[in-house]
Image: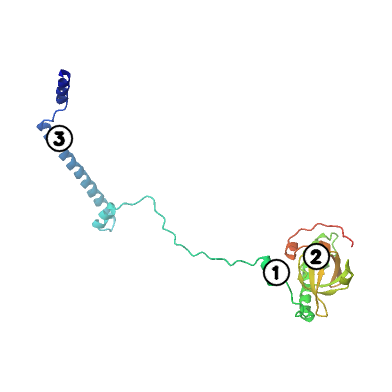
Amino acid sequence: MEKNANSKESEMMFYQPLPAEVRVTLAQHSLLSGSTQSNEKKLEDRFLMSYIQPRTSVIPEELTAQFKKNYPLRVGRPAKENKKTRTRKKALTSIEKRKLGLHKLPKTEIKYKACAPLHQLWVEYMENFLELENSTKAANKDLLYQRIAKADYHGCLLMVTRSKCPSYIGAKGIIVLETKNTFQIICEDDQLRILPKRDSVFTFNVSRWTFTLFGNHMNIRPSERAARKFKSKPTIDL
């Protein structure tokens, strides 16, 4: 019991209220420090105004309002407006094109006389494309062979000279459509015939030159053949 009483007395001795004189001096000191800080701030504002005002045409009230504003260091990006996405029209697939019959030609409406101007245009195209006057005189004719393999044959007057099917031999007409495996020609009797490239040999004339095409070397789509590199191969006899 004596120990507890002694501890309480020591606590009372440790925690004692401040004297009145000390509290008065602390209050006076805080008032003086606050007044000095406010005075310093006023002096700073006056100095800034006296320095900036003669150098600018801004009204002092607007200038003080500008000082009070908060300017963020990081500028936020404006929200993007939702633009309407353009919907692209889907192209027809090869299966849809076949169902619509876009690769088929009418058998009775195409006339041979109507295709004759197309053949004349094709002859002019081949003369310029092959450059026969120069390429036929060259020692190396690989460039000529490459151009013959890559040429477009729509409008060519073609004739079958050899074939494993005898009924195709002697067929002659202007090519109106070329596919991967066939030449579709319009004959002089206005009949549309389909000639397979496989196991057939064709001939055509450009000016005074006659050329021979081996169908087994032409089993490629026309669009792919124009960009393909051909290697020299020996001719395959039927």
Point out the frontmost of discs 2 and 1. Answer: 1
Name the amino acid type tagged 1. Arg
Colouring scheme applied when the structure was drawn: rainbow
Q: Which secondary structure lies at badge 1?
A: helix
Q: Which residue is mark 1?
A: 98
Q: Which residue is mark 3?
A: 26
Q: Residues within 10 Å of mark 1 (few under 14, many from 20)?
A: few
Residue sitting nearer the eye, 16 or 127: 16
Q: Position of residue 2 (x, y in %)?
A: 15, 18
Q: Position of residue 27 (x, y in %)?
A: 14, 37
Q: Which secondary structure lies at badge 2?
A: helix
Residue depicted at 85% across the width and 68% down the height: 202
Q: CA distance from mark 2 to mark 3?
A: 110 Å
Q: CA distance from mark 2 to mark 1?
A: 29 Å
Q: Is residue 171 above or below residue 68?
A: below
Q: Are marks 3 and 1 in contact (CB under 8 Å)?
A: no
| Location of the C terminus (image quadrant) | bottom right
Res 84 label = none
Q: Is residue 175 above or below residue 231?
A: below
Residue sitting nearer the eye, 198 or 82: 198
| Location of the N terminus (image quadrant) | top left
